[in-house]
Amino acid sequence: MAFSLPGLGLAADNSFAAPSADLPSAKSQVARTERLGERTEWRFEVAFGKNYSIKLTSGEAELWGTELAPSQTYNFSGYKGAIFTWQGCSLEVLGEAESEYVGQETEYAVEWLNVHGMLETLRDEAAAAGVHGEGPRVLVVGPDAVGKSSLVRSLTAWGVKVGRTPTVLNLDSREGLLAPAGSLTAVTASSQTEVESGYGIAPVSGPTASPVKTPLVYGWPFPSPTENSEAFKALLTHAALHVTGKLEANTDAKRSGLIVDTPGSLNDPKSNYDILSHIISEFSITLILTIGSERLYNDLNRRFNQSRGDDKAIPVLRLTKPGGAVESDASFLKQARAQNVRQYFFGLPQIPLNPHSHSVPFSELNIYRAKSASTSDDQDFKSGAAAEDDDYEPDGASHDSPGALYEKIEPSTALMASLVAIKLCPGTHVDDREIRDSAVMGYLYVADVDETKKRVRFLAPHPQRWGDRALVWGSLPEPVADLVT
Ligand SMILES: Nc1ncnc2c1ncn2[C@@H]1O[C@H](COP(=O)(O)OP(=O)(O)OP(=O)(O)O)[C@@H](O)[C@H]1O
């Protein structure tokens, strides 16, 4: 179980970033009123470094299922999204967007709400079945940027709104949920979903925030499960034990069920059938939702529904991709991940955090580099670790054997500006499997490495030291050069 480190709750969303470096233009300084008809949405794309704010002035509206509070200003920077209204509303909009318009084609929202209704029926049936009743366990699969995460957020928020406590599991390591990228997070949503944090689970609670549920964070320091499918599957087997154990221990959570978000790289069941089937069996998935690809839908339906016996058939539903869902370029996604890291250490303007500095001698550190099994040439994900491969000397321990996932390294300046995960396992006399399966206690930022004095200065969200635990350095999270100046 991950410790409840401050900072884990503040990185779920791209909104509420640092103030704009640019002076706003005269036009963007004037607040305008946008009137939205029923079942329409205000779609907007805001660049990094720009400020954009929206206030609900009349009617009702929601962002990914979470209702906006009337007259409250919501700020966005480096963000793409849509404010949806069922009955119509007025919004006051201020700031500069790269694109903004009223989306009229919103059939997807009705369809998604119907899925929520279906999940509610299954939850009621679970309650009627008594202590053994289990709620729906949903797997969301589809290509990149088709709205999978938006669907998961909406289903979670609607569930929470009617008093449920669904558990969300994010298997997309490129987008950290309540943690930086490189994390796989499971968290049970609490009774109040906030627009800022996306799921309303923030270990640092504001005055109106609800009780905190501690996320369970595992480390997958690579951009895709396919980097090392066998290790990914083994990690999931371990994670599933804990996640399902947590659900078993809490009747409400068990009945509310599980919603699993997946990376787009798993959208081809031909090549990734193995991983998908593993997720389905380990988490006892009862419903598959797919967005965006007819071929994928047919493939999944054939493999997991039609070709199985009645008692093993898993229904597969194909959902509409939101018209506004847009692909982001590599640079936007990279900036979004860097912003998440900033929020992890420094919080949001309304809930700032003060990270702590720790200076540790090399001799007290056990740092392991996570080795990628793939020979991917995706430069975007190549960290200093991969790029400066030759600088590292494994310590000759068992970890440098061929096929090993981790190798122990000596600290060096190549670690500067990187993030390392603190694993809940000892740093010595530990094998690959234990490092891989241990949950993440939190992340450290390498602020400085002094090779002469043989000391590393870390930035941590917590004043407490982490003892002799193993630290893992991988392709994700990526280094953030300008976190401390
Ligand atoms: N209705 C909408 N209007 C405007 N923007 C939207 C809408 N739905 C989703 N988006 C935006 O489109 C982008 C892709 O959506 P989302 O992240 O939900 O997709 P995804 O399938 O989870 O993508 P990935 O697998 O790449 O993480 C996001 O920036 C999201 O905020």
Image: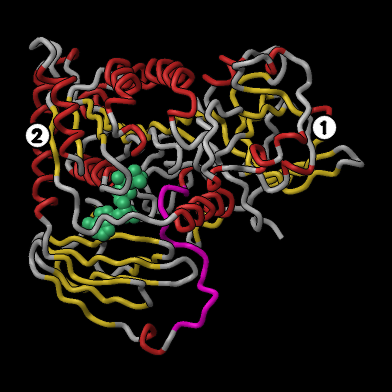
- Three-letter residue code for mark 2: Met
Along the line of sight, the residue nearer the viewer: 119 or 225: 225
| 244 horizontally vs 42: left or right | right
For the question of whether residue 192 can be seen, the reply is no
* Residue that appears at 67% across and 19% down: 426
> Cα distance, mark 2 to mark 1?
55 Å
Residue matched to label 1: 362
Magenta span: predominant SS is loop
* Residue that appears at 23% across and 59% down: 324
Along the line of sight, the residue nearer the viewer: 399 or 268: 268
- Magenta stretch containing residue 11, yes or no? yes
Question: Measured from the top left, where is residue 481 in percent x and y?
Answer: 66, 54
- Magenta stretch containing residue 155, yes or no? no
Question: Measured from the top left, where is residue 75 in percent x and y?
Answer: 39, 67
| 6 horizontally vs 462: left or right | left
| 261 horizontally vs 316: left or right | right
| 424 horizontally vs 54: left or right | right
Q: Earlier in the sequence, mark 2 or mark 1?
A: 2
Disc 2 packing (10 Å; few <14; some 14–19; many ≥20): few
Label 2 sits on a secondary structure element that is helix
Along the line of sight, the residue nearer the viewer: 232 or 282: 232
Residue matched to label 2: 118
Give the quadrant of residue 365: top right
